[in-house]
Image (cartoon, grey):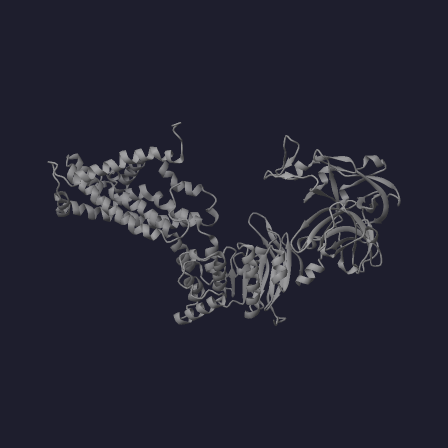
């Protein structure tokens, strides 16, 4: 009786196949290209090339700057919004939250095109403020990803903790600083990691804003369109290393035993 | 224990109405003396937690004053009040270790570090958690977290410690231990405790004063003994401990008629007054049938460890008895009650209580007359199975022989008729009183059960009448 037995495990098969085909294999290919030259020989030249190329390093720094400023702006906008939405009267409404999430339902290219038109009207010539436009475009695109996790952690906060702080002599401000803020950090961290990393690479936003500045994504794109698979792969790999370090750093912070960490998207 | 006569806190005409219009507490007046252990007791939704939250400052009263040492604090924010709270689910800060949790209040007061660490160590000793300073909250058991919560409140040396069902999340054994510890702590520290619970046993064990609440109002304030022995009304009698409640009438000086017989009692209530008699199950004495004031048939005997819980059916009444000796099920027994164990309450409400018969098809009947309802409608979630048995919502079989249904009906919902057969029950008018806009009658059945009926028309003493009782006006309670 060798009938195929359907178990829970077999539910994982489709994803495993997907994982191998579209994640593991491309990664291997990436590794292969990054550490070989045109003749297929093993080499560190690509790595050395990246760190000795002032253009590439400049782009890395520029991307960092764009991503850092974008993340900071998102955080400044998102935290008060999320706090406001999660507390008091609006908590059960959901309508306001929807207003902030709705942009995500509109097609991305449509949104950015609209933004481009608006910015053109305001600035006249988009080429005048490339850095500002990059940050505005990224912020516009990624803001919901910052609001949602923060909103989730704050709205799940046990209100009696805040009451306990006040009961123990903390006024509104210090109850916020000592209890609400530290306990909402998991949401902030997952928001930051959902904004910072894409902001370093998502060059489509810049392209659509006719933004001529280069970020890491555009750099890789330009290598690939010039058929330089080896150089492009190495940059991608460097980026991957940065992401891993970043995730490890924030991941440790997230894991301090508080319930309801992170906060998934929708 | 030295309870002074000084009022530490006084609530005056406190009303709390929420934005949705729900009134949680209405016109509440209460004071607590310095050093007392006062318990607010009542079922959920009675307003006890809201009252505590208003004292703590989390909720502001819609009306009224809260005087603390004579000063009105009703509108002060929580952090300006000299009270501290132990929360129901502890509310310990998960991002701080035990030391930081306890030091939180002291740090708000900006005390120097060495004073803080001395005080934290002191309270940790007090709650038996020496050396727990650097542990994280999540590594502690429920009982330990509870102790930390108490320590965190006590370290601030509050004038009043508020405890909101602090033992609710603990298991029974732990709860009993903590009850004793809290009581002992109260005696040692001399701080005023205001304690909220729905557990009447907990309240009776721990409190100096119990405040029984229901539907936003205080039902009775008194010592545990007062509350237990002299309940002021039906709600208190029913909520505190188990009790038999019988409607009746005073038939002479210190003589009351209820449950189909005349009993001697010690309360001097005017003859002719309608009363409710409260008899605690442990005060009913089982005798030989011929020696009892009333007789009945034993319908169930349950062993409860230290005593038996015995139900005896006498006429249309069911009497609950606790005794160390158990008769057999089906035995005929006599019952009597010592006069000082009968507590007489004068009640405006004269709801009639009587038992229904359950027919084999699970329909209800009284004196062989069917009611237009069945057990399935009364026990929520129950259903009949094809084999004719009845199961409850969890699928367990309900034994009709072990199930009894009590019917309650107001005197105003019963109509009297000359056509004796039309009534569900019939009897003779044995008493009548004019009550301003209606007459109030006592109808005695042949089995000796009294029914209270209100009617606008005058009937004569001794008339034989039938009592029409609409099913939709009855309320049913299940007794197992």
Name the one closer to the observer, B145 or A46. B145
Q: Is residue B98 above or below residue A51?
A: below
Q: Residue at x 83, y 44 (%)?
A: B447
Q: Left or right? Give the position of A156 relative to B333.
A: left
Q: Is residue B305 above or below residue A13?
A: below
Instruction: Give the image quarter of residue A119.
Output: top left
Q: Is residue A68 visible?
A: no
Q: Left or right? Give the position of B343 relative to A261.
A: right
Assign the N terminus of chain A to one quadrant of the image.
top left
Q: Residue at x 86, y 45 (%)?
A: B429
Name the one closer to the observer, A151 or B36. B36
Q: Position of residue A71 (x, y in %)?
A: 30, 48
Q: Residue at x 34, y 44 (%)?
A: A143
Instruction: Give the image quarter of residue B132.
Output: bottom left
Q: Left or right? Give the position of A4 relative to B229.
A: left
Label count reads 0
Instruction: Give the image quarter of residue B458.
Output: top right
Assign the C terminus of chain A to one quadrant of the image.
top left
The residue most toward the front is A1
Q: Position of residue B83 (x, y in %)?
A: 52, 64
Q: Position of residue A260 (x, y in %)?
A: 41, 48
Name the one closer to the observer, B445 or B270. B445
Q: Position of residue B103 (x, y in %)?
A: 43, 65
Q: Is residue A49 above or below residue B62?
A: above
Q: Is residue B167 visible?
A: yes
């Amino acid at each position: 009786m060798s009938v195929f037995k359907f178990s829970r495990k077999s539910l994982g098969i489709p994803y495993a196949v997907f994982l191998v085909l579209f994640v593991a294999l491309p990664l291997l290919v990436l590794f292969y290209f990054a550490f070989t030259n045109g003749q297929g020989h093993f080499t560190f030249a690509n790595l050395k090339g990246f760190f000795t190329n002032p253009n590439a390093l400049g782009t890395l720094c520029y991307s960092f700057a764009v991503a850092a400023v974008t993340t900071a702006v998102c955080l400044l906008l998102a935290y008060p919004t999320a706090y406001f939405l999660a507390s008091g009267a609006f908590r059960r409404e959901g309508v306001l939250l929807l207003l902030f999430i709705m942009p995500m339902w509109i097609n991305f290219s449509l949104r950015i095109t609209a933004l481009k038109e608006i910015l053109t009207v305001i600035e006249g010539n988009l080429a005048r403020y490339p850095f500002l436009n990059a940050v505005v475009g990224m912020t516009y695109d990624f803001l919901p990803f910052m609001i949602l996790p923060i909103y989730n952690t704050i709205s799940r906060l046990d209100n009696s903790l805040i009451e306990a702080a006040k009961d123990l002599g903390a006024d509104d401000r210090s109850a916020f600083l000592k209890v609400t803020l530290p306990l909402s950090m998991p949401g902030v961290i997952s928001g930051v990691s959902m904004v910072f990393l894409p902001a370093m690479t998502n060059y489509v936003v810049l392209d659509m804003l006719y933004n001529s500045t280069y970020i890491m994504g555009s750099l890789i794109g330009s290598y690939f369109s010039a058929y330089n698979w080896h150089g492009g792969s190495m940059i991608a790999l460097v980026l991957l290393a940065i992401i891993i370090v970043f995730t490890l750093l924030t991941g440790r912070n997230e894991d301090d035993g508080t319930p309801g960490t992170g906060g998934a998207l929708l | 224990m030295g309870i002074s006569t000084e009022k530490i806190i006084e609530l005056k005409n406190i009303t709390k109405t929420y934005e949705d219009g729900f009134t949680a507490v209405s016109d509440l007046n209460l004071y607590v003396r310095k050093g007392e252990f006062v318990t607010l007791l009542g079922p959920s939704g009675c307003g006890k937690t809201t009252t505590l939250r208003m004292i703590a400052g989390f909720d502001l009263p819609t009306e009224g004053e809260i005087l603390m040492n004579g000063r009105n604090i009703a509108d002060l924010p929580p952090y300006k009040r000299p009270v501290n709270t132990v929360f129901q689910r502890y509310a310990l800060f998960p991002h701080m270790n035990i030391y930081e949790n306890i030091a939180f209040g002291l740090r708000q007061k900006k005390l120097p570090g060495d004073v803080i660490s001395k005080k934290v160590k002191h309270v940790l000793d007090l709650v038996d958690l020496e050396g727990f300073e650097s542990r994280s909250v999540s590594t502690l058991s429920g009982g330990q977290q509870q102790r930390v919560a108490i320590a965190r409140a006590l370290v601030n040396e509050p004038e009043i410690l508020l405890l909101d069902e602090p033992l609710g999340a603990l298991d029974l054994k732990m709860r009993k231990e903590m009850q004793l510890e809290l009581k002992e702590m109260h005696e040692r520290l001399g701080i005023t405790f205001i304690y909220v619970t729905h557990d009447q046993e907990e309240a009776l064990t721990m409190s100096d004063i119990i405040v029984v609440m229901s539907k936003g109002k205080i039902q009775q304030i008194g010592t545990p003994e007062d509350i237990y022995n002299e309940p002021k009304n039906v709600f208190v009698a029913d909520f505190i401990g188990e009790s038999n409640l019988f409607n009746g009438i005073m038939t002479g000086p210190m003589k009351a008629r209820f449950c189909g017989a005349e009993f001697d009692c010690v309360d001097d209530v005017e003859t002719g007054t309608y009363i409710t008699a409260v008899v605690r199950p442990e005060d009913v004495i089982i005798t030989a049938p011929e020696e009892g004031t009333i007789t009945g048939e034993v319908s169930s005997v349950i062993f409860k460890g230290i005593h038996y819980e015995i139900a005896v059916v006498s006429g249309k009444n069911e009497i609950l008895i606790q005794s160390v000796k158990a008769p057999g099920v089906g035995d005929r027994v006599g019952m009597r009650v010592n006069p000082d164990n009968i507590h007489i309450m004068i009640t405006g409400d004269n709801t009639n209580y009587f038992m229904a018969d359950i027919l084999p098809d699970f329909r209800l009947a009284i004196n062989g007359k069917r009611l237009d309802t069945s057990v399935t409608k009364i026990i929520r979630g129950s259903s009949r199975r094809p084999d004719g048995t009845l199961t409850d919502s969890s699928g367990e079989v309900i034994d009709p022989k072990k199930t009894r249904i009590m019917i309650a009906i107001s005197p105003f919902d019963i109509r009297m008729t000359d056509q004796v057969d039309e009534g569900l029950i019939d009897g003779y008018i044995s008493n009548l009183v004019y009550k301003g806009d209606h007459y109030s009658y006592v109808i005695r059945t042949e089995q000796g059960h009294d029914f209270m009926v209100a009617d606008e028309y005058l009937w004569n003493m001794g008339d034989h009448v039938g009592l029409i009782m609409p099913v939709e006006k009855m309320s049913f309670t299940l007794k197992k």
